[in-house]
Image (cartoon, helix red, strand yellow):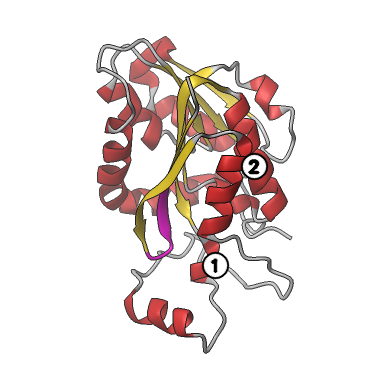
């Protein structure tokens, strides 16, 4: 079971439609992505390598490249059409960016992105794996690609909040106060599978520690939207 399997990421027309809808929310997302990029523990003239995991059409990568003019970014995504749009969006950065098409469910992706990296960043990607075991394994894969002292910044959704059982106190709280998540551009709303195993915030923090991150935290949370960070020992 996966949460994100209704998406047609290999379809150019679908990806174009999805991006056209998502861009409408860039003005809301961009300040958080820029803040997250600015919190990377580097000086502005540092010659660092950053992996943008599930980089989509390049918004997070662009923030990193603008704030760190000597940085190089590797953008990895599952979708060829999405990577092609990222190449267009980030063309002004020239050879400071390289692009990789890979599937996080295939462990071989770690050999395809050309690590090691000083940082890995990701936004609204890893939750789409859906399966707890896949998310747990991805955290371990990310840790394996980081240099000592490297960090992982993950801006994502925590699914236990969005799929709280009907009638529960937590579900009622989120219904009263959670910002509405915009639907997919194709009008699809996530269905809740009967066999869903919800991944909690506590699960993810535990898996980051298990993966080898010595310091982990959720540094920002607004209902189901979270900003996780993990640091490797020097």
24 and 67: which one is in front? 67
Which residue is identified by label 1?
160
Q: Is residue 190 above or below residue 49?
A: below
Q: Is residue 108 magenta?
A: no
Q: Is residue 175 left or right of residue 8?
A: left
**Of labels 1 and 2, the one closer to you:** 1
Residue displayed at 49% across by 38% down: 56
Q: Is residue 66 above or below residue 94?
A: below
Is the magenta region chiefly helix, strand or loop?
strand
SS label for mark 1: helix
Residue displayed at 32% across by 25% down: 41
SS label for mark 2: loop
Q: Is residue 34 above or below residue 162?
A: above
Which stretch appears magenta?
223-228
Residue displayed at 49% across by 45% down: 16
Which residue is identified by label 2?
10
Residue 63 point in image, percent of width and height = 31, 31
194 and 186: which one is in front? 194
Residue contact between numbered discs 1 and 2, judged by CB atoms under 8 Å: no
Q: CA distance from mark 1 to mark 2?
A: 28 Å
Residue 30 point in image, percent of width and height = 29, 43
Q: Is residue 167 left or right of residue 138?
A: left
Q: Determine which of the numbered discs, if any, sits on residue 86 in the image.
A: none
Residue displayed at 26% across by 17% down: 43
Residue 186 point in image, percent of width and height = 52, 62
């Amino acid at each position: 079971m996966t949460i994100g399997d209704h998406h047609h990421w290999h379809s150019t027309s679908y990806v174009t439609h999805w991006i056209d809808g998502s861009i409408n929310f860039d003005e809301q997302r961009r300040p958080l992505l820029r803040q997250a990029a600015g919190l990377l523990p580097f000086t502005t003239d540092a010659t660092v390598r950053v992996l943008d995991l599930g980089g989509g059409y390049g918004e997070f990568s662009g923030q990193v490249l603008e704030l760190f003019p000597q940085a190089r970014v590797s953008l990895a995504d599952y979708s060829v059409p999405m990577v092609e749009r990222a190449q267009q969006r980030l063309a002004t950065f020239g050879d400071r960016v390289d692009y990789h098409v890979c599937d996080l469910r295939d462990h071989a992706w770690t050999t395809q992105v050309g690590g090691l990296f000083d940082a890995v960043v990701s936004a609204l990607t890893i939750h789409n794996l859906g399966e707890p075991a896949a998310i747990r394994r991805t955290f371990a894969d990310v840790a394996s690609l980081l240099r000592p002292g490297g960090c992982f910044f993950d801006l994502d959704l925590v699914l236990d909040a969005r799929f709280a059982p009907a009638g529960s106190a937590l579900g009622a709280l989120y219904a009263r106060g959670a910002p509405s998540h915009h639907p997919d551009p194709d009008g699809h709303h996530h269905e809740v599978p009967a066999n869903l195993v919800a991944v909690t915030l506590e699960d993810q923090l535990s898996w980051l520690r298990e993966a080898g991150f010595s310091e982990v935290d959720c540094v920002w949370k607004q209902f189901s939207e979270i900003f996780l960070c993990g640091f490797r020992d020097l």
